[in-house]
């Protein structure tokens, strides 16, 4: 068993609070991704789990042991870094064998582990080479191999794909997923890239300023973001936001801003009651808008003037100005020829509207 339990983890560097209060239970074999902008405390959290950083407060358990006081080497974890951290003067074979030799494991056993890892990662033909004779992707595979041979309880990854070009990153994502099928070790993976988080994680932890913002499956985060930050961070192109004034009518709420006015049934949007007479922020994903007028009560409609289009081949993304707001509309027919200034009307299903408290950013439910 290798579940991980983090309880009220906290880390300060002098006056800087890197991690404020982090609690999470990670199940055996689970793959959890920590994602957030640079400086939000991802690496610090990971390094505390690894034992590379003293903790200021809280408890870390791996399996059924509290590991707070244990040295990194005694925690039964293996870590992959962005810069691979391979020994340049050693062959790939010796890099893979290094950890086990340090532990005085018998050479025959080491050889079996090294060859098995090399087979899993398709690096058998590279075993006699030095790291500098390898491509970035191959070096990253060796770094993964070094973890596999140790057969640890936990894998920790700190932005392992960030040094690779976009194409190789996409390929290594698939390889890491395949690796999980063969080596289903409990893993914590840190990245600033929401696509990596969405595609790799069983669960994702979104962080900002040393605080967890939301924990959930990729679909939960996409469909039901708890606040505006998560809503804007997950999904690409990013969610559109428009600040709107709320007034209550007989059985609806009217939301309006410069160039846009919509009505929402009170039954479905009861949470808006507390915001009547104030401003809320409406969020709509670019993918959830369809060109054309809103038909029937299950949609709202609004529109503006086309500013520019981005042609992606399989779709166009339109930038549309509504009053002072610029919004994006994705999934538009790439063949559609649209001139700047054209009036663009869009319809959005009610179920795809997100509403946030403009001051706190919290989702209004
Ligand atoms: N050794 C350190 N000394 C002082 N401040 C640090 C140290 N390591 C990290 N920090 C600060 O802690 C915060 C979180 O850093 P980090 O965990 O590396 O963020 P991330 O990995 O999310 O980019 C940042 O403000 C960073 O500057
Ligand atoms: Mg980092």
Image: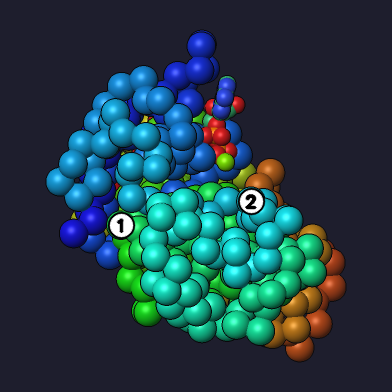
Q: Is residue 9 left or right of residue 92?
A: left
Is residue 264 among what the camera can see? no
In the image, farthest residue toward the right: 339
> Which residue is at the front of the view, 254 or 355?
355
Binning the other alpha carbons within 10 Å of mark 1 as few (below 14), some (14 to 19) or many (20 upward) gives: many
Locate the N terminus by quadrant.
bottom left
Q: Is residue 257 left or right of residue 111?
A: right
Residue underneath mark 1: 153
User: Which coloring applies here?
Assistant: rainbow
> Which residue is at the front of the view, 142 or 247?
142
* Residue at the spot 53% in from the left edge and 50% down from the top edge: 158
Compared to residue 10, the image places residue 307 above or below, namely below
* Residue at the spot 76% in from the left edge and 88% down from the top edge: 335
Quadrant in the picture for residue 236? bottom right
> Which residue is at the front of the view, 66 or 278?
66
Is residue 22 among what the camera can see? yes
* Residue at the spot 44% in from the left edge and 59% down from the top edge: 100
Per the model, the C-alpha gap separating discs 1 and 2 is 21 Å
Residue underneath mark 2: 85
């Amino acid at each position: 068993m290798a579940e991980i339990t983090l309880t009220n983890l906290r880390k300060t560097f002098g006056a800087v609070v890197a991690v404020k209060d982090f609690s999470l239970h990670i199940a055996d074999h689970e793959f959890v991704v920590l994602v957030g902008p640079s400086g939000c405390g991802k690496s610090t959290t990971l390094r505390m789990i690894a034992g590379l950083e003293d903790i200021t407060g809280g408890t870390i358990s791996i399996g059924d042991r509290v590991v707070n006081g244990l040295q990194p080497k005694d925690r039964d974890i293996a870590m992959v870094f962005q810069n691979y951290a391979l020994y340049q003067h050693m062959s790939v074979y010796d890099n893979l064998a290094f950890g086990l030799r340090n532990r005085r494991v018998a050479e025959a056993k080491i050889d079996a582990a090294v060859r098995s890892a090399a087979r899993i990662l398709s690096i058998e033909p590279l075993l006699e080479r030095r790291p500098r004779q390898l491509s970035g992707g191959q070096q990253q595979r060796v770094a993964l191999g070094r973890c596999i041979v140790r057969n640890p309880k936990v894998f920790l990854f700190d932005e392992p794909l960030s040094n690779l070009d976009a194409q190789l990153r996409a390929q290594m994502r698939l390889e890491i997923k395949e690796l999980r099928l063969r080596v289903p070790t409990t893993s914590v993976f840190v990245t600033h890239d929401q696509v990596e988080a969405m595609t790799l994680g069983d669960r994702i932890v979104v962080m900002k300023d040393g605080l967890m913002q939301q924990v959930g499956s990729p679909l939960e985060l996409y469909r039901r973001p708890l606040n505006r930050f998560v809503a804007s961070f997950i999904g690409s192109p990013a969610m559109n936001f428009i600040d709107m004034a709320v007034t209550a009518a007989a059985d609806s709420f009217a939301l309006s801003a410069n160039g846009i006015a919509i009505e929402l049934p009170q039954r479905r949007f009861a949470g808006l009651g507390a915001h009547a007479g104030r401003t809320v922020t409406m969020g709509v994903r670019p993918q959830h808008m369809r060109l054309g007028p809103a038909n029937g009560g299950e949609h709202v409609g609004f529109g503006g003037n086309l500013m520019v289009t981005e042609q992606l081949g399989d779709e166009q993304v339109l930038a549309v100005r509504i009053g002072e707001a610029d919004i994006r509309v994705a999934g538009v027919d790439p063949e559609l020829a649209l001139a700047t200034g054209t009036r663009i009307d869009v319809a959005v299903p009610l179920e795809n509207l997100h509403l946030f408290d403009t001051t706190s950013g919290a989702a209004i439910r």
